[in-house]
Image: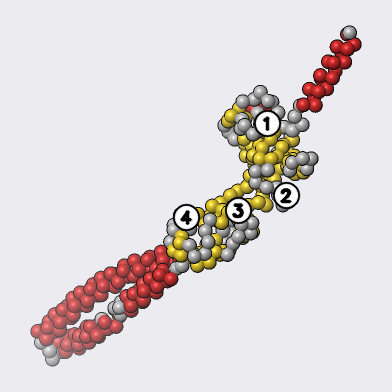
Amino acid sequence: MKRIIYIAMIILAVSSCGKKSAFDAQGTFEATEVVVSSEATGRILSFEIEEGMPVKAGIVVGIIDSLQLHLQNKQLSAQLSALLDSRPDIKAQVAALREQIAKQKSELKRVENMLNDGAATQKQYDDIETQIRILDCQLFAMLSTLDKNTSTINSNAEALEAQIAALADRIVKCRIVSPIDGTVLVKYAEAGELAAIGKPLMKIADLDNMYLRAYFTSNQLSNLELGNEVTVTADFGGDERYDYVGRITWISPESEFTPKTIQTKDSRANLVYAVKIAVKNDGRLKIGLSGKVTL
C-alpha cells in the first residue's frame, strides 16, 4: 500500500512539473503606428497608395488641390513687386538739392574772399549763409519724409512677404507624405474625395522594427534591465514557433492588473508590469501575434 502511495506521489510531482510555464512572460506584438491626417482643405487630386504598400518617409504619395493657393500666391507676389518698385530713390531725389547746397557753399567761399578784399559786402555774405541754412532745412525735411515713406513701404512689404511664406507653407501641406518608413495598414480616403484639415488619410506602421509588449510580475523585475537581451518566441499556432533575439527598451514604472488574455509565470499574480521588447522583423511577425519571453 505504501508503495502505491509513493508511486502516486511521484506521478503527481512529475505532472506538476510538466504544467510549470516554460516561459517567463507572455504578450502580443506591436508596431509604431502613425495616422497621417490632412493638413489642407481641398479635393484630393491623387492618392497613389494601397493597403500593404511600403512607403518611404518624405516621399509624396498624394496631392490635394492647391490651385487657389497658387493664384493667391501669384497675386501677392505681384503686389509685393509693385510695392518694392514704389520705394523712393532717396539718393536721386535729393541730388538736385545737394547740388544747390554745394553751389551755395562754393559761392559763400568766393564771397568770403571778396569780402576780405573789400570787393563784397557783409550783407551779400549773410544772404548766402541764410540761403544755405534754408536749403539744409529743406534737405533735412525731404530726407525725413523719404525715410518715413521707405519705412512704411518696407513694413508693408514684410507683411506681404509673411503672407506669401504662409501661403507657401499651405501649398507644401497640400502634399500627402509619410513621416516614417513603413507599410500602409489602412487607407481612409480616395482620390476625388474632399479632404479637410485633421481628416485621417492613412495609417502607417513600421513593421520592420516590432515590439513585444510582455507582462512580468514584481518578483521578476530584479532580472530585468534596459538593454538586456532576451529570447522572444513568436507563436504562430499549432507547433509553429520561431525564436527571435529581443532587447528590452522600456519597463513600465507602474503596475497594472493582469490583462485577461495574458498568462504569467505566477498564476496568482494580480498585478504586473508592462515591458517593451524590440524585435527585428524577418517578415513573419504580425501586429497582434502572440509571443513569449524567456530570460
Please indicate whether residue 120 sits to the left or right of residue 47 in the image. left
Residue that label 1 marks = 263
Determine which of the numbered discs, if any, sits on residue 199 in the image.
4
Q: Earlier in the sequence, mark 4 or mark 3?
A: 3
Q: Nearer the viewer, residue 194 or 107?
A: 194
* Element at label 3: strand
- Please indicate, yes or no, whether residue 109 appears anywhere in the rendered image: no
* Mark positioned earlier in the residue sequence (4 or 1): 4
Q: Do tag 1 and tag 2 residues touch (Cβ < 8 Å)?
A: no
Which element is circle 4 on?
Answer: loop
Q: Are marks 1 and 3 in contact (CB under 8 Å)?
A: no
Query: Front-most of 65 and 108?
Result: 65
Residue named by callout 2:
284
- Side of 129 where 50 appears, left or right: right
Q: Secondary structure at mark 2?
A: loop
Compute the Cα span from label 1 to label 2. Answer: 23 Å
Q: Earlier in the sequence, mark 3 or mark 2?
A: 3
On the image, the x and y values in percent for residue 173 come to: 47, 62
Q: Is residue 186 above or below residue 219?
A: below
Q: Amino acid at mark 1?
A: Gln
Q: Earlier in the sequence, mark 1 or mark 3?
A: 3
Residue shown at 45%/62% (left/top)?
Answer: 194
Q: Distance of mark 2 from mark 4, alpha carbons? A: 32 Å
Q: CA distance from mark 1 to mark 3?
A: 29 Å
**Disc 3 packing (10 Å; few <14; some 14–19; many ≥20):** many
Determine the residue located farthest toward the top in the rendered image. Answer: 1
Tag 2 and tag 4, C-beta contact below 8 Å: no
Residue at 71 percent across and 37 percent down: it is 292
Q: Earlier in the sequence, mark 1 or mark 2?
A: 1
